Image (cartoon, rainbow, N blue to C red):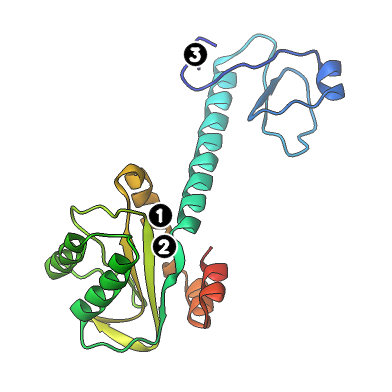
Amino acid sequence: SETFKDRLLIRNVLSISCFLQHATVSDLVITTLPVESDGRRIVQVNPILTRKNMDDIREKLDHIEEEKRLEHTKTFFQSLFHKELYFRNLVLEDEEAYIRFMGQRCMERGYIKEGFIQDVVLRESVSSTAFTDVLAMPHAISQNAERSFICVVHNNMPIRWGRKTVHFILLVGIARQEMKYFTPAFDLVVDLFNSTNRTIELLKTGTFEEFCRRII
């Protein structure tokens, strides 16, 4: 309790027979006897805790926290996509035209205010957001969205974006209260599009529903 007071709440202490008879819901079971996992997260320790036991508990806590962080990120990521912000085979003259079109659609639906669009255009002028050979992810420098979203353009024909050509443009806007999720969600998208197999699957999609199934 003292060592892990900021990370661990001990909810119950049970005999092994009581534990086996009455299933308890918890993130972690610390036990001095072998217990079948049955999907539970378990750390077996000595009756007198050793330094290695403490390290094992710490490692398991790190793993649990990372799993929870990833689960929160995935749930947030899933909530970013909206059918009214998905566009297929849209042909415009240049990067700025795409940003302004997507921004306008977002503004009409209350996701952003007008200043957001200009901020994204400014960000793009500083450095291209074509992060892979398939994906551009324009986003604002300092403006927050009213509601978090990802606006998607998916074209069969490649779109010239800076020095690259892309098939997907994902305009990203994050509300102020959800900014802590921005970097994990951003990393998740880039990792997805860095996978050749995932990218090929996404390129084959033709509807919003198919796109969401593949990307999520």
- Counting other residues with Cα less than 10 Å from the Cα at mark 1, is it few (<14), some (14-19), or many (20 or more)? many
Q: Quadrant of the N terminus?
A: top right
- Mark 1 lies on residue: 185
Residue holding disc 3? 3
Q: Secondary structure at mark 1?
A: helix
> Position of 104 compared to 135: left or right?
left
Disc 1 marks a residue whose amino acid type is Ala
How much space separates mark 2 and mark 1, taking CA atoms?
6 Å
Q: Nearer the viewer, residue 107 or 148?
A: 107
x and y percentages locating residue 145 in the rendered image = 29, 55
Coordinates of residue 103 in the picture (x, y in percent): 26, 69
Report whether 123 appears left or right of 184: left
Query: SS at mark 2?
Result: helix
Q: Amino acid at mark 3?
A: Thr
Separation of disc 1 and disc 3 at Cα? 32 Å
Give x and y (percent) for residue 174.
Answer: 32, 53
Q: Is residue 82 above or below residue 67?
A: below
Relative to 78, is 144 on the left or the right?
left
Q: Please say whether residue 162 is visible from this viewpoint.
A: no
Q: Nearer the viewer, mark 1 or mark 3?
A: 1
Depth check, mark 3 against mark 2: the one in front is 2
In three-dimensional space, the C-alpha distance between marks 3 and 2, rounded to whole angstroms, equals: 37 Å
Q: Amino acid at mark 2?
A: Val
Q: Which residue, given by chain and number where applicable, does mark 2 sit on?
A: 189
Residue that appears at 52% across and 83% down: 206
Secondary element under disc 3, as helix, strand or loop, is loop
- Label pair 2/1, CB-CB below 8 angstroms: yes
* Chain-order first, disc 1 or disc 3: 3
